Structure formats: C-alpha cells, structure tokens
C-alpha cells in the first residue's frame, strides 16, 4: 500500500500589469496557495486553496501532519480527520480552504494511483466538455469605462462564449447604464449575468434588479451580504431575476442555511474553499434535493479549473428530461498567467466550451520549471 510522504504548501504570485476593481476592493497582484502531495512511491497530486494565500498556507501546514503517513485512498476518512481537528476554531473560512486544497490534491493522487480521471471516481462522466461563461468586465479607473466594458463583452461574444458575467456594485445608477451598454453590445443571443460581490442592501438590490430585468439577466450574484439569508429570500420574491450566491459559504452546514431559507436559485460553492471535491459533491446532492441549481465558483489556476471540470463532468442536473440541461463552468478571463501557464494542457475554450481532461487524476500536469518563476515561498 502506498502512503502519503509529503504535503507541501507554496505561494505563487504575479504582479498584474493593470490593476482592476470590483465592488469591494482592487487587485494589483494575483496570488494563490498551491498544495503538492507526494506519495512514497513518487505519485504526485496537486490542489489549491481559495483565499489569502499566506493564511491558506499556514492552514495547510497545520493540517499536513494529520495526513502524512496515511493511505491516500482513504479520502473520506482523511477529510473527516482534518475537519475534526479544525472545527473547534474554524467552521468557515480559510482553514476550510486549506482542507479543500489538500482534499483536491488527494483526489488527484487517487486518480493517478488508480489510472482514472477524478470524474470517473466521482461516479462517471456524463459529459466530455462543459459550457463555460466568461468572467470579466471588472471596473477600472480609466475614463470611458462604459465603452471599455461593452468592447470587452463583445470580444467574449466574438470568441464564441454563449454566456458572460460582468461586475455591478458601483452604484445603482452606474450599474444600470453599464448593464444596458453591455446588453446592447452583445445582442440578445448571449446570456448575461451580473455580480455585485455583496455591495448592496435589500432596498438597493431590489431597485437594481427591477431596473435591469428588461436586459434579461441570467442571474444576480451576491447582491447582499452573505450573512443576510432572510434578505436573499425577500429579494427572490421581489424580482424575476434568479439569485445566485455561495462563494463565501462553506461546508454542508453553511449551504444548508442558504437552502433552508430559500435564499438562492443558484448555489456557487468553490471547490477550493467550501470543503474540496469530497464536500462539494455532497453540497451538490443537497442542492438537488432542495431544487437549487449548482454553478461552482472558480477563480484560481488551471488546477482549480481542472477540479471544477471533473466535478461538472460528473454532476447531475435535476430534473431529468429528454433534452438535458447542462451545468456551466466559470472561466475567469482577467490577466492571470498563474491560470494560463502553470498547467498543461491549457484550458482554451472552443465555441464557448471547455474539454474535460480524460487523463488520470485531475488530468493536468503542473509545469514545475515555470513554478519557480512565480513561487514566493
Ligand atoms: Ca462572484
């Protein structure tokens, strides 16, 4: 039997050429904590955590001794061991992201040990490619922002994307103008989602939602504070736009609150934060039982994209029908060489779809030579 020999956490970072903004903050650097698990027989698996990279790294270093020396095939048992060691202090947040990073790496290891892609280990491949939406259209401080947003949106449509997501959350009036410009730029054939990153109170969110209903919005993401479960339910009652949230939610217990309160139409667990593939598979099953759609949040390197693709290949979409509905992949399009360069194959969308890797594990290889270029510690 093979055993886990090492769990290494490393921060990789890239200073952006152009700073961009969303409703809460700005990005001038992209950084992430990667996790490399190596077995005694030399099998290597990769994962990553979503959240402040240095804090996630500390979490991984705290948890690593719990899995070193253990059998990597004991996935659920190892997950439970990490969870029980952290639950007293961290039922949400970056320690759960650290569990997620190790969990994803262990799925990669198991797939490689068994010679099977993770999607098969999850229960089978329902689809070989997944429709993707382009995440972009962030704010900048440059003049002429509305024109830039419209041009960027048109670029995604021209590249073949059938769905795109833009930022809102500046102010209700500015948002209405920006959304109108983007809808006009892409025409009626492209699905358009908006994301406020919890910028608004209920009154503002209702005002924005009603004003942009004529622009046929696919979903309104994180309109309100992630703590405001009741507000989400009331907003759902007051607009025809589907409501999405969940990138700030963790574990089954967190999503249960969203579902019991009827807070969302679309749940967005992040595989690298909400508890890893092990936990998000369960969250997806729970969502189905509550009649909630699942569209995972994804904002990382090619490792995170590969993990999302493996889950989405396997994921059931309820209710069944002859012409089945499909889940959708979030594909960040902002400047990020950590996403584009660190793994092969690169995820290049074709006709707005991305192929699900069929090689063992997550199905990607990390370019360790390039890793040195971005590695901080
Ligand atoms: Ca978001």
Image (cartoon, helix red, strand yellow):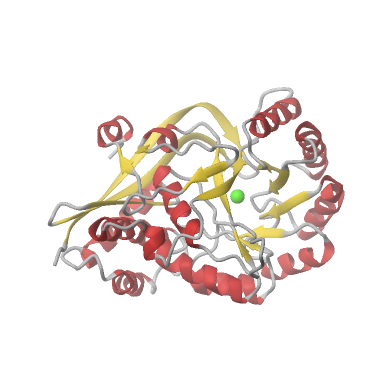
Position of 98 with respect to 333 (left or right) is left
Q: Residue at x 25, y 61 (%)?
A: 114
Q: Residue furthest front?
A: 322
Residue 358 in picture, x, y percent from top left: 38, 50
Choose top left, top right, bottom left or bottom right for residue 113: bottom left
Rendered view: 20 above or below 277? above
Residue 71 at least partly seen? yes
Quarter containing the C terminus: top left
Rendered view: 3 above or below 261? above
Residue 92 in picture, x, y percent from top left: 47, 65
| Front-most of residues 192 and 9 | 192
| Front-most of residues 6 and 318 | 318
Rendered view: 252 above or below 212? below
Residue 193 in picture, x, y percent from top left: 70, 47
Quarter containing the N terminus: bottom left
Position of 325 with respect to 349 (left or right) is right
Rendered view: 80 above or below 343? below
């Amino acid at each position: 039997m093979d055993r886990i020999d090492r769990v290494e956490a490393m921060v990789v970072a890239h200073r952006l050429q152009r700073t961009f903004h969303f409703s809460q903050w700005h990005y001038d650097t992209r950084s992430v904590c990667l996790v490399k698990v190596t077995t005694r027989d030399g099998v290597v698996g990769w994962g990553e955590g979503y959240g402040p990279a240095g804090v996630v790294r500390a979490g991984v270093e705290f948890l690593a001794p719990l899995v070193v020396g253990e059998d990597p095939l004991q996935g659920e048992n190892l997950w439970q061991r990490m969870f029980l060691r952290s639950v007293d202090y961290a039922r949400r947040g970056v320690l759960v992201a650290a569990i997620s990073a190790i969990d994803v790496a262990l799925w990669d290891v198991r797939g490689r040990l068994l010679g099977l892609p993770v999607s098969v280990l999850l229960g089978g491949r329902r689809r070989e490619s997944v429709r993707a939406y382009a995440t972009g259209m962030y704010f900048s401080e440059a003049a002429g922002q509305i024109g830039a947003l419209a041009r960027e949106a048109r670029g995604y449509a021209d590249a073949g994307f059938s769905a795109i997501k833009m930022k809102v959350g500046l102010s209700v009036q500015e948002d209405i103008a920006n959304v109108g410009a983007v809808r006009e730029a892409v025409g009626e054939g492209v699905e358009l989602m908006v994301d406020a990153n919890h910028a608004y109170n209920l009154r503002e969110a209702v005002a924005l939602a009603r004003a942009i209903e004529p622009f046929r919005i696919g979903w309104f993401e994180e309109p309100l504070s992630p703590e405001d479960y009741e507000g989400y339910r009331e907003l759902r009652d007051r607009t025809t736009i589907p409501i999405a949230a969940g990138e700030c939610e963790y574990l089954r217990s967190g999503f249960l609150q969203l579902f019991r309160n009827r807070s969302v139409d679309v749940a967005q667990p992040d595989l690298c934060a909400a508890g890893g593939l092990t936990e998000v598979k369960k969250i997806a099953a729970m969502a189905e039982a509550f009649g909630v759609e699942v569209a995972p949040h994804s904002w990382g390197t090619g490792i995170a994209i590969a993990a999302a693709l493996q889950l989405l290949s396997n994921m059931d979409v309820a209710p069944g029908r002859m012409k089945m509905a499909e889940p959708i992949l979030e594909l960040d399009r902002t400047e990020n060489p950590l996403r584009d360069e660190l793994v092969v194959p690169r995820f290049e969308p074709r006709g707005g779809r991305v192929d699900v890797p069929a090689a063992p594990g997550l199905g990607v290889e990390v370019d360790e030579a390039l890793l040195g270029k971005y590695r901080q510690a």
